């Protein structure tokens, strides 16, 4: 959410708290995570192409992207706890981010669709989960 607000504001250099910048991901767990991420990114790069890069790098696109990331992050945050409904909005943010990084508008659009499906799931199924929890109490 912090990065999304900075994108909306038009910052070219993203500010992160010093504590986050000092975070050390080395070690067994960090190496496994990094290795897994690199493998998945390489797989995705094989299918990704620069599609409409002007729509992924222009200022209005970055403001829209930042707004979508902020909204999807809020939806994921507000999803009922332990329901798993936060997964689709969060996945949408990741796929959209990869679309921006790889300048692939199709990937950006796919992430937006995934995120929107997540919003529908949180609203629809989240209401059911909340009702069921209320009935149990």
Image: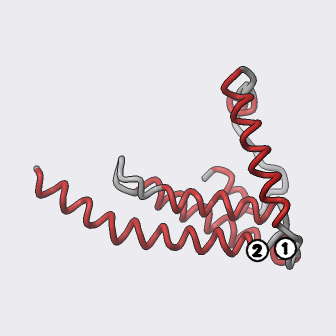
Considering depth in this image, is 1 or 11 the residue closer to the camera?
A: 1
Which residue is at 68% across, 73% downward? 64
Give the secondary structure at mark 1. Answer: loop
Q: Which residue is mark 2?
A: 61
Quarter of the rendering containing residue 80: bottom left
Which residue is at 26% across, 60% downward? 129
Give the label on residue 128, or none. none
- Do the residues bearing badges 2 and 1 touch, measured as CB atoms within 8 Å? yes
Which residue is at 63% across, 67% downward? 67
Considering depth in this image, is 74 or 133 the residue closer to the camera?
A: 133
Position of 64 relative to 88 (above/below): below
Could you say where residue 102 lies in the image, as x and y percent from the top left? 84, 62
Could you say where residue 127 lies in the image, as x and y percent from the top left? 28, 66
Q: Which residue is mark 1?
A: 58
Quarter of the rendering containing residue 105: bottom right
Classed neighbour count for the residue bearing mark 2: other residues with Cα under 10 Å, few (<14), some (14–19), many (≥20): some
Could you say where residue 20 lies in the image, as x and y percent from the top left? 69, 33
- Specify how the rendered protein is coloured: secondary structure
Image side of residue 72 versus residue 9, left or right: left
**Count of labels shown?**
2
Image side of residue 14 versus residue 91, left or right: right
Give the secondary structure at mark 2. Answer: helix
Residue ranking furthest to the top: 27
Image side of residue 49 versus residue 86, left or right: right
Could you say where residue 136 lies in the image, as x and y percent from the top left? 11, 52
Q: In whole angstroms, how far apart are the C-alphas of marks 2 and 1?
A: 5 Å
Classed neighbour count for the residue bearing mark 1: other residues with Cα under 10 Å, few (<14), some (14–19), many (≥20): few
């Amino acid at each position: 959410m912090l990065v999304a607000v900075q994108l909306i504001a038009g910052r070219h250099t993203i500010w992160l708290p010093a504590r986050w910048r000092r975070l050390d991901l080395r070690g067994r767990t960090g190496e496994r995570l990094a290795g897994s991420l690199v493998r998945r990114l390489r797989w995705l790069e094989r299918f990704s192409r620069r599609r409409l890069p002007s729509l992924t790098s222009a200022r209005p696109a970055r403001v829209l992207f930042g707004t979508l990331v902020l909204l999807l992050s809020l939806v994921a945050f507000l999803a009922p706890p332990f329901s798993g409904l936060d997964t689709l909005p969060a996945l949408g943010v990741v796929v959209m981010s990869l679309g921006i990084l790889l300048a692939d508008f199709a990937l950006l659009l796919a992430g937006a669709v995934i995120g929107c499906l997540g919003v529908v799931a949180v609203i629809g199924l989240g209401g059911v989960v909340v009702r069921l929890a209320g009935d149990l109490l």
